[in-house]
Image: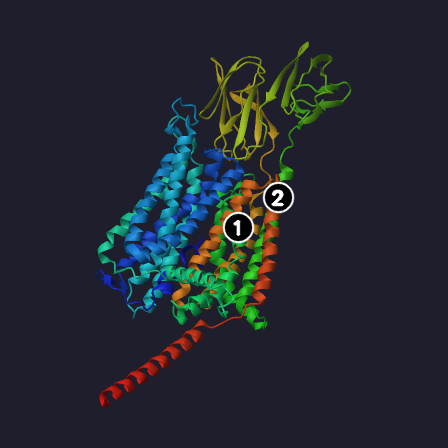
Amino acid sequence: MEYFKPQADTSISWYQVNHKGKGGKTTGKSVLCFGFPLSIFFIVINEFCERFSYYGMKAVLTLYFSRFLHWEDNFATAIYHTFVALCYLTPILGAIIADSWLGKFRTILYLSIVYAIGQAVLSVGSINDLTDHNQDGFPDAIAVNIALSVVGLILIALGTGGIKPCVSAFGGDQFEDDQEKQRGTFFSLFYLSINAGSLLSTLITPTIRASQCGIHSKQECYPLAFGVPAILMAVALVVFVIGSKMYKKVKPQGNVMLEVFKCVRFAIRNKFRHRSRGHPKREHWLDWASEKYDKRLIAQIKMVLRVLFLYIPLPMFWAVFDQQGSRWTLQATAMNGDFGFQIQPDQMQIVNPILIVVMVPVVNSVVYPLIKKCKLNFTPLKKMTVGMFLGSMAFVAAALVQVQIDRSNPVFPAAGQAQIKLINLGAVPATVQFQPQLQTVNLTPKEETGYMTFETSKLQSLDIISANQNKTEHLELQEGQRYTLAFKWVPMDINYTWIEDNVTSKPTDGRSLVRFINNFSFTVNVTMDDMVFGELDPLSVTNYTVIPNPGWSYTIRASTPQYTCTVGSKEFGYGGVYTISLDDCVEKKLIITHFEDIAPNTVHMAWQIPQYFLLTCAEVLFSVTGLEFSYSQAPSNMKSVLQAGWLLTVAVGNIIVLIVAGVSAIQQQWAEYVLFAALLLVVCIIFAIMASFYTYIDPNEIEAQFSKEEKEEDKKDQDSNEKKTETDSRL
């Protein structure tokens, strides 16, 4: 969420940091409404719709990669962070384009069109039926969906990043110099619209995504989950265009970042050209630019570089922070989201914005004043250091949660092993002996065992003994396979079925699987709501089928030409795998038995709240304080350079994640969490050492000193000119 999140939409706007005091030419008439320019209401509505569009799309993106495109978790994480990195690189380009060529209005307009097209392309690319010509529920040409999705995401990154530095500044341009109070109120409304859009979209779009839609087959509704943000972006564009005649449009006046870059480049080249011993050394390498650039600009750049030097360790914090939308969302898919109502894995991200809204005022009005009363020197750099430490602890908490998830996961057979599960469908007890004399298992009626592991080279046969009947089955098991042996005693015999279970891992998408076994002595037709399993002969088994909404109760029907029996199922747990035995029919009520092949997710999503709490505390201390400190240490006309540097640290942080996800050989997710926690802790220590050597300055005093010197020089020049004029007149 972007409540006081300068890295995303600059709580200290680009207007304030880069345009204050500039008297550029403007176009457009200002129409007032309640003392405010009417145009700002179009800008606020535009921002709400755009933020809804961006965060709504971003909330479901990781699950779209893993569930729809079926990308492996590491690859899905890498692509997600590539997209986020691009979103934080393009604002620099957008600011340069707006300030140097197109102006803010046309930059917002043109890139919003690109943005809306990207959202539409992504929505179309997520349509399952687009290439599903054989109507089997799977795209026949997934490459088409991937290509459209990638093109859409690139356009979205260009659009959202390009307009990011322009919209708030464009809103600031609408006010006159004597409307400081109204301008401040506007920025409050502006960021309220950001928060409202991001909060609502993070809540709504995962719910839409979890619904079922499709022409040939019903699946998770990604087209609508991406389509709604696309519609909101189109609305944002229309609203922005409607207000076009009311906007005050400041002409482009050049971008200070380009000037800084040119000055630094000239200094480096000049120093390199004069590297021989014959040239005297200068106090600072930037002083080599003094031949072309004035002393004030060089001094301002020196102040900026001192702050940018402190930015070097910062990407590691963003590498941790931005994994809320990737690794933590994937972690939530393996957890139980039952809060009395079902929370989707991608909805857990909403914890961060809710905590931000609560914590920022609490920290500012309660925590910091208490620290001040205790006479503790809690400087901005110390706040950032504590924030990095808390970010590290958040990933320690995530690792502990992951350990609990891993412990609850089933153990599958390794090389040279197979697993067997027994189900006694009969009405009398039974005993199963694994030969040669490996294990003996006693089962009561309607009882099941867990999966038992055997060495395939040792297990040769098994004996089923029930009611003085004995049945021997010689075995040839495949390595790494799971089997289910379902049996029942019938008069003078034992009937059984040997089932090869084709589930090799716990369902990773939070869905559940179910299959049916016919325990009647005749054939029945089986359905569960609108899912048709077909005719089942006695002791035959259906294939596993995905349960669309495990938290729901379904009506199970077993029918013959003569009658139909029904029963409501109990709720299926998320991530579970079930076998349901159809046992009997009493007065048209179906008697069934649930068997649990794989336990559902048992670790509750609420256990993620501590890690979100720690990371939100880290954000308040690190992110909010970071730019406030940076801006306090740089001249007013250089703040946009710091904004660009800050955005660059976010981009680099996401690049770190995609590198780790792409090349890491770590197999256990908890170990990767510990790795990131350790890296951030090390960086935290490095940053603390760097901060201890930093000397705080007051740029205003330095600026005032330069102004005083310039006035003195101007006065000297004026006096000199006057004397020269007087001398000339005498001659």
In the image, taking residue 322 as reference, residue 439 lies left or right, namely right
Closer to us: mark 2 or mark 1? 1
Q: Which amino acid type is shown beneath numbered disc 1?
A: Ala
Q: Quadrant of residue 715?
A: bottom left
Q: Secondary structure at mark 2?
A: helix
Q: Residues within 10 Å of mark 1 (few under 14, many from 20)?
A: many
Q: Which mark is residue 319?
A: 1
Q: Which amino acid type is shown beneath numbered disc 2?
A: Trp
User: Is 674 or 257 nearer to us in this picture?
Assistant: 257
Vertical order, 475 against 290 (above or below): above
Q: Which mark is residue 670?
A: 2
Q: Residue at x 28, y 54 (%)?
A: 102
Q: Residue at x 32, y 45 (%)?
A: 114
In the image, taking residue 54 as reference, residue 23 lies left or right, namely left
Q: Secondary structure at mark 1?
A: helix
Farthest residue to the right: give it: 437
Q: Quadrant of residue 189?
A: bottom left
In the image, taking residue 680 as reference, residue 213 lies left or right, namely left
First along the sequence among labels 2 and 1: 1
* Image location of residue 686, percent across then percent down: 59, 59
Q: CA distance from mark 2 to mark 1?
A: 16 Å
* Image location of residue 669, percent across then percent down: 60, 42
Vertical order, 457 against 34 (above or below): above
